[in-house]
Amino acid sequence: MVPLSWYIVLSAIVFSIGMFGFLVRRNLIIIFLSIELMLNAVNISLVAFSHYLQSINGQILVFFVITVAAAEAAIGLAILIAFYRNKPTVEADEINLLKG
Amino acid sequence: MKYVLIPLLPLIAFAINILFGRKYIKDKAHWVSVPAVIMSFILAVGAFMDVKAGKVININLYDWIVSGNFNVTIGFLIDRLTVVMLLVVTSISSLIFIYSVGYMRGDKGYYRFFAYLSLFVFSMLILVMANNFLLLYFGWEAVGLCSYFLIGFWFDRKSAANAGKKAFVVNRFGDFGFGLGIILIFLTFGSLEYLQVFPGAHSIVGQTLNIFGHEVDTITVICLLLFCGAVGKSAQIPLHVWLPDAMEGPTPVSALIHAATMVTAGVFMVARCNPLFVLSPVAMNTVAVVGGVTAIFAATIALVQNDIKRVIAYSTVSQLGYMFLALGMGAFSAAIFHLYTHAYFKALLFLASGSVIHALHHAKHDDEQNMQKMGGLRKYMPITYLVFILATLSITGIPGLAGFFSKDEILWRAYMGGNLGKFLWFLGTTAALLTAFYSWRLIYMTFHGKFRGTQESERHLRESSPVITVPLMFLAVGAVAAGWVGIPPLFMEHGDRIGAFLAPVLGHSEGHGTHAEEFMVLGASIAVALGGWFIAHRMYIKRPELPQKIMDKFQPVHRLLFNKYWVDELYDKTIVQPLLKGSEKVILGIVDAKIIEGVVNGVPALIGAFSRRLRRIQTGIFSYYGLVMALGALIIIGTMIFLK
């Protein structure tokens, strides 16, 4: 039986990787993937706790997170494509039209 | 309470005309206003009957301002003084309204004219019906506002717009004092209701007020401040300058201002406040002297003016002087009596001169108000001529007509008033001589001799239409018969019915004079009336070259009078110009340029400077925001863990 702490540690590691990618990478697609990683890290901990506490609530929440993540990915990619048509780049630093 | 309708009907007429006049009513505006004011007149007659039967109506309709111990209601007091004023105002206004239908026909502001006219009458009715000082003040100011609208009615003429402004601003000077007087009344009596202030007036005799270290009698200060307002509104020296300029308005407006509404307000107010005034000899003497001096001052100016309406305007100022003279001598009912007779003959003079102007206007005469370009009109306008003669006989005080009784009453009261009274009587009698002269001069220059315009215009001269001449005839009846309610006891026992009627409100003015003296005063009045007539006849009919000769001989005097003692110029130099210059420097140079523009430009500059700093944090770098967000999350989690 794998103890709970391992799941937590795995979740923390995946979250940190996602966070790191979100902060350092410039490519918007990679940034999106990083966000997905963070969301899934949260999912891991939710399922783990759900199992540990023998409560279904955590798993229900996971479905919500997956749904939100799917919606976010769809909208994010749509924005990305719309942006790409205006300016042929996916570099985050190039998106600075609103810079003060 | 049907008497509420007396002021309400003209107000409704105003509202209907001003709201719907432009699009829907247009040239049918008189169908709204004329019936309204005639209904008011009928109701006023009803009120007169009620009051005559001994009723005094005092009702509060509505709590207007309630604040601590400061309570003001909208309420009406209808007593004997009020009903006399109501009758004068509504009857004269009705006739003027009917006259205006003919006079203003075809004017593009027809509906506007009737709207303002109705509002004017409403304001005046509120003024005379108020039962407290604040409502009186409301009516007072509203009357001033309407005069501004109506004097400047033809606002596309610069002179008319200026005259409107002048009337308003000059009135403001007087109203400032009036306002202060009302405040002082409230501070002294703790109330603004007539029926609480007047009975309490005796208790403050001797009370003093500290003004800049001087102890002054409170009641004198109150009366002088109130009188200040009356001086402005009733065009007494030194605030008379607006009234002659008010001639820029249409003639019915002049008649309304001079006869029924507006200028009589000052006389009414002083008469209304007679319980206060009688307690202050200083104020009474001031009123009397201002009145007497104005009477003769304005009469001298009228001697040489050539504008037909201007002569009559100065005549009004002079006649108002008589009224104040009477008020100051304590003959309140004589003043109201003169106000009432004057309303008829002065309205008649104005409307008749309006008829002349109207006829000349239609004859395409170029200078339609200049008497030097008139002459010989009696042939073409017999009705106007006849009523003009009647009004003139009345104003000059020919026995039997209205003006004779009231003017004689005033002069007789003045004569009995001690040394000051004798002096004022002398001024008044001299002014009566001048009045007779300039009135007949006006008639001779306008109606007698040869027409001095072009032949083309002469062919088009015609008598005015019945809508104009019928009101004139009604007024002529008033100008002749209005005085018959005040026949002095000398001729008829109990003849002074109006004096007796007003006595409960205005008191008996007792006098001690012998019959011989009374006959002397009477004789003097008649002598000057006939004397003035004779001189005018001699100068303008018998020897028409004489006026020019006299003018050449007394050039400086003529210039002085013709330029109205340069009072306008004096005010221009001492008040208007310094104010303009000062405003340019202070208001424009400092307040506007520095303070207002400083604030207007300073606030955005400040915000701009702040935002310039603030927007540095909006880098637009994506991962920078992410970092801040992550750090924020870390800090929150950290504090949650460590502060547990």
Image (cartoon, rainbow, N blue to C red):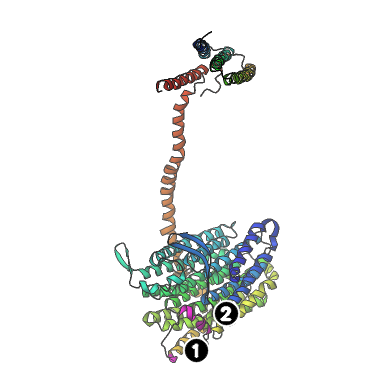
Seen from the viewer's position, the closer of residues B410 and A21 is A21
Q: Which kind of residue does numbered mark 1 sit on? A: Pro
Single out the residue that lies furthest toward the top. A1
The residue lying at 64 percent from left, 57 percent from top is B19
Residue B9 picture location, percent across and down: 62, 66
**Residue B499 inside the magenta-drawn segment:** yes
Q: Quadrant of residue B280?
A: bottom left
**Vertical placement of residue B637 versus B312, above or below:** above
Left or right, B214 with respect to B15, comes to left
Q: Quadrant of the N terminus of chain B?
A: bottom right
Label 2: element kind: helix
Q: Which residue is mark 2?
A: B541
- Magenta region, residue range: B493-516
- The answer to whether residue B510 is left or right of residue B106 is left
Residue under numbered circle 1? B489
**SS at mark 1?**
loop
x, y percent for residue B414: 43, 81
Instruction: Locate the C terminus of chain B by quadrant.
Output: top left
Label 1 lies in what chain? B
Give the residue type at disc 2. Ile
